Image (tube, rainbow, N blue to C red):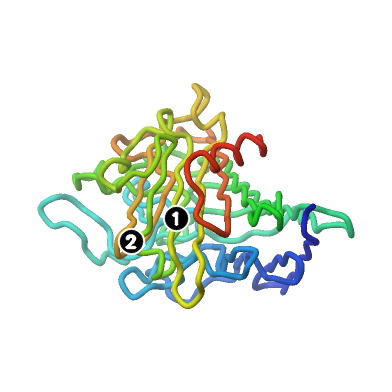
Amino acid sequence: MTAQLTATHTHGERITVAADGTEILTYVYRPDPEAFESRKPYAHPVRTLAGNLVTGYRPNDHRWHKGVQMTASHVSGQNFWGGNSYLNPDVGYQRVEERVGSMRHDGFPRIEAPAPDGDRVAIAEDLTWLNHGGEEWARESRTVTIHSVEPAEGAWALDWSIHLTNVRGEALHFGSPTTAGREMAGYTGLHWRGPRDFAGGQVVTPAGPSTDEETMGTPVADAPWLGFTAERDDVDAHTTLVFAHAPENLGETAIHPSHWFVRSGATPTVAFSWAFFEEFALAPEESFAFRYRIVVADGAWDAARIENHLKNHPW
């Protein structure tokens, strides 16, 4: 049995989705005020069906971390991640405001709100990636879909797709701090930041319990999904998030091989890194696309339960 979904659109600001009255996701498209944090839409707060928060917003260690958001830490000298930019091993991170770009919300060509018996909400959005000076560098078609909301399973799913086209007039080069010289810091792409009580959580891979060191930089061809389980503060409960790649992300049609970025310590984060170890180029007027899934579940799920859930909810 699925939950009853509702979607509330506060025009010019946000769309909030609730399941049986519990708000499980708010998609914010009104730009935040601080340009240095790379203004862009994001999903926060995100909650389990029991109402437990699973996203962090502007933590004091990284103010530009905002729930679930599409990022790109290094694009032809611009930073669509936010905050300090990693320049090279000699100088490390520096505050370079003129490197920080933004993603402009251009409109919602389609919002599929649930019918009385509907089981999903789909939000299609058009965006433009702007460099710091306001030049249009890329056009993005994005879809955020909430589905498979199952109270008996204690879980629901968020699918996030991106189709990005280069409109700059010259190639866009996508990289990461690692491609700029910092070892094992290949963060870029779709990024989740967890709340404080996710710190010290357990990483899970198809092989079972794992660690940051074992998982960081793992090719997604070897591990198409990654789990993250944490015991919560305030409530006697665990939460599990599952991050999964769509099959086409792993195939030959993908513009570049993806790898996992994960930290389970003081700054709980997971990123679907599309340029961890090597840069890739997107030619003028060319496009690339990726699809991702995040399963939000109450309880501590092991590898077997994650595998079974993903098998029962195919793409």
Q: Residue furthest top?
A: 252
Q: Residue furthest front?
A: 236
Residue 229 marker? 1
What residue do we see at 53% from left, 35% from top? 288
Q: Is residue 315 visible?
A: no
Q: Secondary structure under badge 2?
A: loop
In the image, taking residue 141 as reference, residue 208 lies left or right, namely left
Look at mark 2 in the image and give the residue it sits on.
200
Residue 279 marker? none
**Where is the C terminus found, in terms of image quarters?**
top right
Nearer to the camera, 200 or 220: 200
Q: Position of residue 171 (x, y in %)?
A: 41, 37
Nearest to N terminus: mark 1 or mark 2: 2
Q: Amino acid at mark 1?
A: Thr
Q: Position of residue 263 (x, y in %)?
A: 33, 54
Q: Residue furthest right?
A: 116
